[in-house]
Amino acid sequence: MRDYNAEAQSRPDKRYDYNFDEIVRDYMMKRFAPHFAPGAALELGCHEGRSTTLLAQHFDDLTVIEASSDAIAIAQRNSPDRVRFINATFEEAKLDRKYDSIFLINTLEHLEETGPVLRNIHDWLAPGGHFYVLVPNADAPSRQIAVQMGLIASNNAVTPGEWAHGHRRTYSFDTLEADVRAAGFKVEQRGGLMFKALANFQFDRALEAGIIDEKYLDGIYSLGMIYPQMCASIYLICGK
């Protein structure tokens, strides 16, 4: 049995979330928001609610499913009272409605089996709705550099630290698209967020030292639109 509360926690030797993660989330919303339409929204996996608070700025009707009760307790404190939280796994959750927008942000890589969950999401998505899925990119230059340094075995390896935080796989565009298409989705848009030559902790140190600034971040965001396969995260926007 997996301990979802333990997976959500930071370890003394390894942070779960970095400042760079927050930056990527902000740019993610910049990319996704133009596609938003009115209606009910569903977020699958919220950790401590950082994406939830951003989504709540756009959706008055927002439901969140999260397996970690500890994470939900924190997310609820950080979110508007109107956000509805359900403490369940995606396999066990029972929903009695359809949603116009569904978000799976940095979560698909945590699943034991992706097929059943993606098929559930397909069932929960309203006709004409959009499914937004974003995952860390196995082919990011920072990861390829780590392979060349001998720190990880291959681009798609799951490191011990990632495994401890619940990661069960890594994704590149081909494997991500294969999984969502197998569940019946049609890919309407694909892209990458933030050209990434540094590891997250290196980005944080460079930001703290003033070596890089907001202008640099805007630059790697724009460069990511030219080289999506070399970004920190990759995403798909899908319909039925």
Image: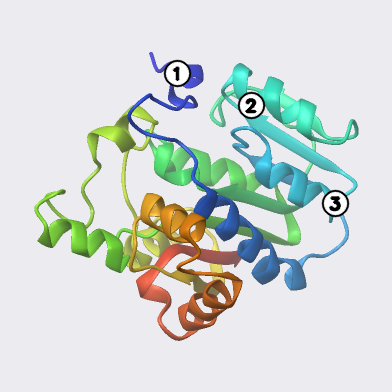
**Mark with earlier residue (1, 3):** 1
Rendered residue at 65%/71% (across/down):
31
* Residue 240 visible in the snapshot: no
The image position of residue 101, as x and y in percent, is 73, 55
Residue type (three-letter) at the residue carrying disc 2: Ala
Rendered residue at 71%/30% (across/down):
75
Residue type (three-letter) at the residue carrying disc 1: Ala
Is 179 left or right of 144, judged from the image as shown? right
Q: Nearer the viewer, mark 2 or mark 3?
A: 3
**Mark with earlier residue (2, 3):** 3
Circle 2 crowding by C-alpha within 10 Å: few under 14, some 14–19, many from 20: some
Q: In front: 91, or 206?
A: 206
The image position of residue 192, as x and y in percent, is 48, 71
Q: Secondary structure at mark 2?
A: loop
Residue type (three-letter) at the residue carrying disc 3: Phe
Q: Nearer the viewer, mark 2 or mark 1?
A: 1
Residue 6 numbered mark, or none? 1
Is 206 left or right of 63, judged from the image as shown? left
Q: Nearer the viewer, mark 1 or mark 3?
A: 1
The residue tagged 2 is 93
Name above or below for residue 77 compared with residue 223.
Answer: above
Name above or below for residue 159 compared with residue 201.
Answer: above
The residue tagged 3 is 59
Q: Secondary structure at mark 1?
A: helix
Name the quadrant of the C terminus.
bottom right
Q: Secondary structure at mark 3?
A: loop
The image position of residue 132, as x and y in percent, is 61, 58
**Mark with earlier residue (2, 1):** 1
